[in-house]
Image: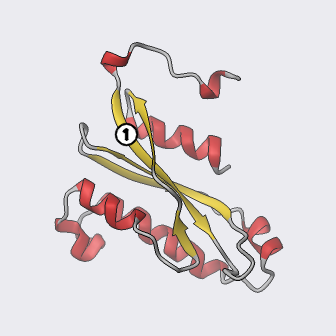
Protein backbone atom coordinates (compact mmCIF):
# COMPACT_ATOMS: atom_id res chain seq x y z
CA UNK A 1 0.00 0.00 0.00
CA UNK A 2 1.28 3.48 -0.78
CA UNK A 3 0.40 7.03 0.31
CA UNK A 4 -2.32 7.31 -2.35
CA UNK A 5 -4.44 4.89 -0.32
CA UNK A 6 -3.80 6.27 3.18
CA UNK A 7 -6.05 8.89 4.75
CA UNK A 8 -4.40 10.54 7.72
CA UNK A 9 -6.13 12.18 10.69
CA UNK A 10 -8.76 11.09 13.13
CA UNK A 11 -12.36 10.25 12.27
CA UNK A 12 -13.71 13.33 14.04
CA UNK A 13 -12.31 15.75 11.47
CA UNK A 14 -13.59 13.78 8.47
CA UNK A 15 -17.01 13.62 6.86
CA UNK A 16 -18.78 10.77 5.13
CA UNK A 17 -18.90 11.02 1.35
CA UNK A 18 -20.25 8.86 -1.46
CA UNK A 19 -18.71 8.34 -4.85
CA UNK A 20 -19.34 6.52 -8.10
CA UNK A 21 -17.26 5.99 -11.19
CA UNK A 22 -18.49 7.06 -14.59
CA UNK A 23 -17.91 4.28 -17.07
CA UNK A 24 -17.94 4.36 -20.84
CA UNK A 25 -19.47 1.23 -22.33
CA UNK A 26 -19.04 1.59 -26.10
CA UNK A 27 -20.58 -1.78 -27.01
CA UNK A 28 -23.06 -3.01 -24.42
CA UNK A 29 -23.21 -6.48 -25.96
CA UNK A 30 -19.52 -7.00 -25.17
CA UNK A 31 -19.73 -5.69 -21.60
CA UNK A 32 -16.37 -3.92 -21.81
CA UNK A 33 -15.91 -0.53 -20.21
CA UNK A 34 -13.34 2.07 -19.27
CA UNK A 35 -13.47 4.44 -16.31
CA UNK A 36 -13.86 8.02 -17.48
CA UNK A 37 -14.85 10.04 -14.43
CA UNK A 38 -15.80 10.23 -10.78
CA UNK A 39 -18.81 11.70 -8.97
CA UNK A 40 -18.49 12.70 -5.31
CA UNK A 41 -21.29 13.71 -2.94
CA UNK A 42 -20.82 14.88 0.65
CA UNK A 43 -24.07 15.72 2.41
CA UNK A 44 -22.39 17.42 5.38
CA UNK A 45 -20.61 19.83 3.06
CA UNK A 46 -23.58 20.18 0.65
CA UNK A 47 -21.12 19.22 -2.07
CA UNK A 48 -21.55 17.36 -5.34
CA UNK A 49 -18.84 17.35 -7.97
CA UNK A 50 -17.60 15.47 -10.98
CA UNK A 51 -14.28 15.27 -12.77
CA UNK A 52 -13.79 13.42 -16.02
CA UNK A 53 -10.89 12.19 -18.09
CA UNK A 54 -11.46 10.26 -21.31
CA UNK A 55 -8.59 8.14 -22.59
CA UNK A 56 -9.57 8.26 -26.25
CA UNK A 57 -7.00 5.66 -27.29
CA UNK A 58 -8.44 3.11 -24.82
CA UNK A 59 -11.97 3.90 -25.95
CA UNK A 60 -11.06 3.43 -29.60
CA UNK A 61 -9.26 0.17 -28.75
CA UNK A 62 -12.58 -1.16 -27.44
CA UNK A 63 -14.58 0.23 -30.34
CA UNK A 64 -12.79 1.86 -33.30
CA UNK A 65 -16.09 3.44 -34.36
CA UNK A 66 -16.98 4.94 -30.96
CA UNK A 67 -18.48 8.43 -30.99
CA UNK A 68 -15.66 10.18 -29.13
CA UNK A 69 -17.24 13.63 -29.45
CA UNK A 70 -20.55 12.28 -28.14
CA UNK A 71 -18.83 10.68 -25.14
CA UNK A 72 -17.03 13.94 -24.36
CA UNK A 73 -20.38 15.78 -24.56
CA UNK A 74 -22.05 13.28 -22.18
CA UNK A 75 -19.20 13.59 -19.68
CA UNK A 76 -19.33 17.40 -19.83
CA UNK A 77 -23.09 17.26 -19.21
CA UNK A 78 -22.49 15.34 -15.97
CA UNK A 79 -20.01 17.99 -14.82
CA UNK A 80 -22.54 20.74 -15.65
CA UNK A 81 -25.31 19.07 -13.64
CA UNK A 82 -22.96 18.79 -10.66
CA UNK A 83 -22.02 22.46 -10.89
CA UNK A 84 -25.66 23.52 -11.02
CA UNK A 85 -26.65 26.99 -12.17
CA UNK A 86 -28.64 27.88 -15.27
CA UNK A 87 -26.59 25.57 -17.52
CA UNK A 88 -27.83 22.56 -15.52
CA UNK A 89 -31.39 23.07 -16.76
CA UNK A 90 -34.10 21.63 -14.52
CA UNK A 91 -31.46 20.14 -12.21
CA UNK A 92 -30.31 23.66 -11.28
CA UNK A 93 -33.05 23.95 -8.66
CA UNK A 94 -32.26 20.58 -7.09
CA UNK A 95 -30.13 20.23 -3.98
CA UNK A 96 -26.72 18.48 -4.31
CA UNK A 97 -28.03 15.17 -2.98
CA UNK A 98 -30.84 15.00 -5.48
CA UNK A 99 -28.51 15.83 -8.38
CA UNK A 100 -26.11 13.08 -7.22
CA UNK A 101 -28.91 10.51 -6.92
CA UNK A 102 -30.16 11.39 -10.39
CA UNK A 103 -26.66 11.05 -11.87
CA UNK A 104 -25.98 7.66 -10.25
CA UNK A 105 -29.35 6.16 -11.26
CA UNK A 106 -28.82 3.16 -13.56
CA UNK A 107 -29.12 3.90 -17.26
CA UNK A 108 -28.41 2.11 -20.49
CA UNK A 109 -26.43 4.75 -22.33
CA UNK A 110 -22.82 4.75 -23.40
CA UNK A 111 -21.85 6.68 -20.24
CA UNK A 112 -23.05 4.79 -17.17
CA UNK A 113 -22.55 5.25 -13.43
CA UNK A 114 -20.98 2.44 -11.46
CA UNK A 115 -22.04 1.36 -7.97
CA UNK A 116 -21.97 3.92 -5.16
CA UNK A 117 -19.21 3.55 -2.55
CA UNK A 118 -18.52 5.48 0.66
CA UNK A 119 -15.53 6.91 2.45
CA UNK A 120 -14.35 9.57 4.86
CA UNK A 121 -12.72 12.84 3.88
CA UNK A 122 -11.79 16.26 5.18
CA UNK A 123 -12.11 17.88 1.75
CA UNK A 124 -14.63 16.49 -0.79
CA UNK A 125 -13.13 18.50 -3.64
CA UNK A 126 -9.63 17.16 -2.96
CA UNK A 127 -11.09 13.66 -2.60
CA UNK A 128 -12.64 14.01 -6.04
CA UNK A 129 -9.25 14.83 -7.57
CA UNK A 130 -7.58 12.00 -5.65
CA UNK A 131 -10.16 9.45 -6.83
CA UNK A 132 -9.85 10.60 -10.44
CA UNK A 133 -6.09 10.12 -10.26
CA UNK A 134 -6.37 6.76 -8.48
CA UNK A 135 -9.24 5.15 -10.39
CA UNK A 136 -9.43 6.81 -13.80
CA UNK A 137 -6.09 8.16 -15.00
Q: Quadrant of the N terminus?
A: top right
Tag 1 secondary structure? strand
Horizontal side of residue 66 vs 6, given as left or right: right
From the viewer's side, name the closer residue of 80 and 32.
32
Question: What residue do we see at 53% from left, 80% from top?
Answer: 109
Residue, x 43% and y 71% (percent of image)? 77
Q: Return the x and y of residue 5 as percentages of the image width and height.
A: 61, 28
Q: Is residue 97 left or right of residue 58?
A: left
Q: Position of residue 25 (x, y in %)?
A: 65, 73
Q: Residue 133 or 98: which is nearer the viewer? A: 98
Q: Residue at x 41, y 30 (%)?
A: 120
Report the coloring of the rendering: secondary structure
Q: Is residue 24 above or below residue 13?
A: below
At label 1, counting other C-alpha atoms closer than 10 Å, the crowd grade (few under 14, some 14-19, many 20 or more) is many
| Residue located at (73% from left, 68% from top) | 56
State the residue position of label 1.
17
Using the rendered view, name the quadrant where residue 98 is placed.
Answer: bottom left
Residue 91: x %, y % from top left: 25, 70
Q: Is residue 72 left or right of residue 105?
A: right
Amino acid sequence: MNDRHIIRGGPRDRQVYEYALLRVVPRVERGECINAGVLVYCRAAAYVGALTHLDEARLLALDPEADVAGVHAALRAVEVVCTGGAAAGQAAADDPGRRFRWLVAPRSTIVQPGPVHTGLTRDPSAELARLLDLLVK
